């Protein structure tokens, strides 16, 4: 903790305020990647990513594959930095206890049958969105042909969501653009500053877990 603190609350020095503002600015700027060209809302983008990652896990692929593919034409330093980003994602996921539990539950459920999909209820937890927001986004994506709803092989009373081939193609098109946007944002940081930032984020994340 800093050695000295102001006795009165100053927003420019108040961490919660600064973090919320930064997160909002990043979210708004990044949204241009998938909104203008692909006409996706933020909830649709989150659902697309979570279902794509779920599909990757079931097919034995991981996030690192995506990062590695995007770095093929970059120099060695960029490849190392991309790997650091992938490791940071994995560390952050480990600190999110509730989300980890949901992922584990999905994995265990899929062991008994062929891999299925993710329920809308599970998506509300994974994507940190309320039920109504997820429902609206799912309807939009079903209408656009990005999602398919099918019976859960482990529970015939429930249904799960999965990406269609069109949805997978959309994700594969947007993902490299998303990584390029992230790389451009982080270009202002040195490699050591980036590692320090990730460590600090992880430490604060764990503090709140």
Image (cartoon, helix red, strand yellow):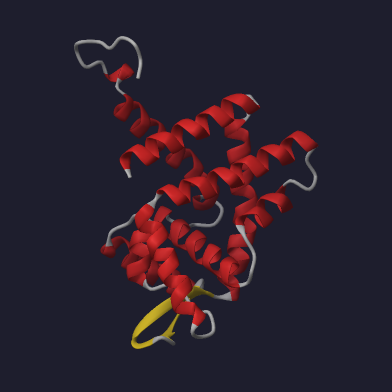
Figure check: 88 above or below 163: above
The image quadrant that residue 53 belongs to is bottom right
Give the farthest residue toward the bottom. Answer: 156
Residue at 45 percent of width and 57 percent of height: 46
Question: Which of the two residues, 193 or 163, is positioned nearer the viewer here?
Answer: 193
Question: Which of the two residues, 199 or 77, is positioned nearer the viewer here?
Answer: 199
Residue at 44 percent of width and 62 percent of height: 47
Residue at 52 percent of width and 67 percent of height: 54
Figure check: 178 above or below 39: above
Labels in figure, total: 0
Instruction: Give the side of residue 79 with respect to residue 101, left or right.
Output: right
The image quadrant that residue 88 belongs to is top right
Task: Residue 208 in the image: state x and y as whole percent.
Answer: 31, 40
Task: Residue 86 in the image: state x and y as whole percent.
Answer: 60, 47
Give the farthest residue toward the left. Answer: 8
The image quadrant that residue 108 belongs to is bottom left
Q: Quadrant of the C terminus?
A: top left
Q: Quadrant of the N terminus?
A: top left
Residue at 47 percent of width and 46 percent of height: 92
Task: Residue 31 in the image: state x and y as whole percent.
Answer: 48, 46
Instruction: Give the side of residue 98 with respect to residue 60, left or right.
Output: left
Figure check: 121 above or below 84: below
Regarding residue 55, the answer to whether it shows in the image is yes
Figure check: 195 above or below 136: above
Regarding residue 188, the answer to whether it shows in the image is no
């Amino acid at each position: 903790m800093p050695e000295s603190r102001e006795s009165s609350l100053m927003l420019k020095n108040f961490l919660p305020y600064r973090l919320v503002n930064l997160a909002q600015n990043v979210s708004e700027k990044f949204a241009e990647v998938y909104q203008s060209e692909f006409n996706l809302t933020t909830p649709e983008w989150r659902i697309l990513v979570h279902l794509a990652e779920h599909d990757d896990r079931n097919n034995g692929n991981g996030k690192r594959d995506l990062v590695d593919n995007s770095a093929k034409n970059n120099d060695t330093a960029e490849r190392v930095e991309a790997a650091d980003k992938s490791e940071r994602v994995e560390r952050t996921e480990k600190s999110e206890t509730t989300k980890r539990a949901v992922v584990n539950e999905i994995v265990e459920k899929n062991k008994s049958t062929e891999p299925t999909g993710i329920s809308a209820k599970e998506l509300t937890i994974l994507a940190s969105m309320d039920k109504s927001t997820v429902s609206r986004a799912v309807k939009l994506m079903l209408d656009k042909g990005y999602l398919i709803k099918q019976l859960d092989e482990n529970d015939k009373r429930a249904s799960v969501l999965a990406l269609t081939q069109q949805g997978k193609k959309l994700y594969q098109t947007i993902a490299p653009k998303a990584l390029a946007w992230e790389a451009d944002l982080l270009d202002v940081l040195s490699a050591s500053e980036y590692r320090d930032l990730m460590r600090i984020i992880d430490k604060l994340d764990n503090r709140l877990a």
